Image (cartoon, rainbow, N blue to C red):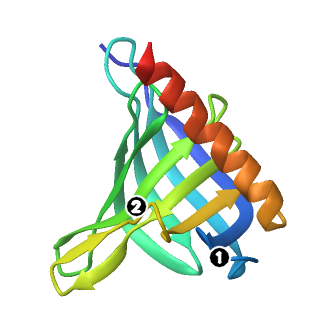
Amino acid sequence: MSYKPDCFNNLYTGVKYRLNSDGILQEVRIEFNGRMTKRIFNNDTFEGIIVLDNHEYNNCHVSLDKNNSGTIHYYSKTGSLGIIGKVYFNNRYNSLTIALYEKIDWNSSSWDSEDGLMITAPATNRKEAIRLANSHLESILKKDLN
């Protein structure tokens, strides 16, 4: 059973940074433009366009788990499936953290908990970003332990 999809057009302003490194790499704007389908017994899903670092990803799909986190998939213009990373939203979808996957070779990418790339919003500096990212991830770990 699902509800009618709702417009989900959210703009976030945050920072991009690397774990275990000081400072931020850059300020970023993240846009989610599409539809969110909220389901009673299944995962909520987002489908639409995501704009990240001024790069537009079309045909994006995110199936959110019970913790409001999920992998961001997209289809390229050539039709191949790609992964941007894993997004962690708060319960009201007004803040997020994205663990950005980095390309290893032509057909694989990954994220590293030691020095991986992160985007967190809303944040204007590294301290705010780390605090907010920890709150996103902490709530997930607590829910998984119960």
Residue at (35, 18) in percent of width and height: 2
- Whole-percent x, y for residue 86 in the image: 42, 53
What is the secondary structure assignment of the residue under circle 1?
A: loop
Residue type at mark 2: give it: Gly
* Picture quadrant of residue 73: bottom left
Q: Nearer the viewer, residue 19 or 11?
A: 19
Disc 2 designates what residue?
85
Q: Residues within 10 Å of mark 1 (few under 14, many from 20)?
A: few
- Whole-percent x, y for residue 84 in the image: 39, 66
* Picture quadrant of residue 42: top left
Disc 1 designates what residue?
21
Q: Nearer the viewer, residue 146 or 39?
A: 146
What is the secondary structure assignment of the residue under circle 2?
A: strand
Task: Tell me the distance, in whole angstroms, between the alpha carbons under discs 1 and 2.
Answer: 20 Å
Residue at (54, 70) in percent of width and height: 51
- Whole-percent x, y for residue 142 in the image: 53, 23
Residue 104 got which mark?
Answer: none
